[in-house]
Image (cartoon, rainbow, N blue to C red):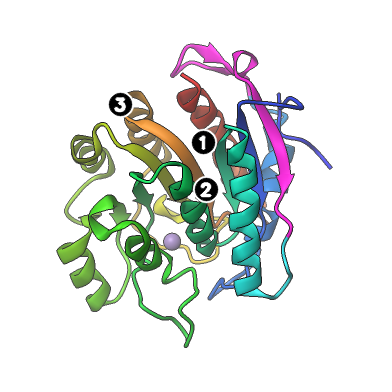
Amino acid sequence: MATLLGARENGLLAVWGVPMDFTASWRPGSRFAFDAIRLVSTSLELYSPYFDRSLEDVSYEDAGDAELLWGDVQGSLDLIKEQAEKIMEKEKKLISVGGDHLVTYPLVQATKKFYPDLAVIHFDAHTDLRQSFLGSKFSHATVLRMVADEIGSKSVAQIGIRSGVLEEFKWGTENTHFFPDHKWDLVPATAEVIKIFKSRPVYITLDIDVLDPAYAPGTGTPEPGGCTSKELFQALHLILENLNVIGTDIVEIAPDYDPSERTAFMGAKIIREMLLGMSK
Ligand SMILES: [Mn+2]
């Protein structure tokens, strides 16, 4: 199996696969995301012109993939939390690669143990604020509601949102820092969120479908009308330059739906920029 480009045996940052896609409501396949990213990362430059630094100067490891109980959602969530805590106990900052979006819940729970005051910045096309979906509380469509219950809804900011049901839009507007895409472009929304979360430890959860499907067709539930890849990098750089990012996840990349591999390349480049921005 390929390893993420430039990874060392023991690093201060860990990139970790969480290949659980049991709750994908339309098309599964995000369990294959990190392997696709590892493969294409071998063609990515180590140097980032955005940071004027190279990954050669960053100490990071490929921590492999989470062990899961295949098909057992609750059991796997518990296992993910446990394993994430073990990695963070060694004072490593974690960049996790999903999996479907539900993996964010145990990852935020684990991160909260080390950063009780954490705030979450959520990039997504979808609100993910349902209280239950298809009869289940545990779903990639409910995950941000669960995160809001866990850390407080005012510790959650949502950017790029353009899909959900009326109740979710209403609940988001009233409870989280809610920046729907039809009112807020990605970069100005991000600038507002930076003002709100200044001085807080910040966790970024990035659903790749925040991008327009033109830029990231390899995903389970593509949603037309999204931002460009350039806007997403501008927003991420703004956060990495101005806030203390202590953890992140990238979810919902399903490489099999994208023979061009551009979605996996997107994931690899985001991880490179995260590694550089989180290792300042
Ligand atoms: Mn989504």
Identified at 32% across, 30% down, the residue is 243
User: Which residue position holds label 1?
Assistant: 270
Q: Residues within 10 Å of mark 2 (few under 14, many from 20)?
A: many
Q: Which mark is residue 242?
A: 3
Find residue 140 and report its horizontal and vertical position in percent.
48, 68
Q: Residues within 10 Å of mark 3 (few under 14, many from 20)?
A: some
Which kind of residue does numbered mark 2 sit on? Ile
Q: Is residue 23 left or right of residue 179?
A: right
Secondary element at tag 1: helix
Identified at 37% across, 30% down, the residue is 244
Which kind of residue does numbered mark 3 sit on? Asn
Q: Determine contact: label 3, label 2, CB under 8 Å.
A: no
Find residue 256 and report its horizontal and vertical position in percent.
68, 58
Is residue 151 in view from this perspective?
A: yes
Q: 202 or 164: nearer the eye?
A: 202
The range drawn in magenta is: 45-67
User: Which residue position holds label 2?
Assistant: 250
Is residue 214 in view from this perspective?
A: no
Mark 3 and mark 2 lie on one chain; the one further toward the N terminus is: 3
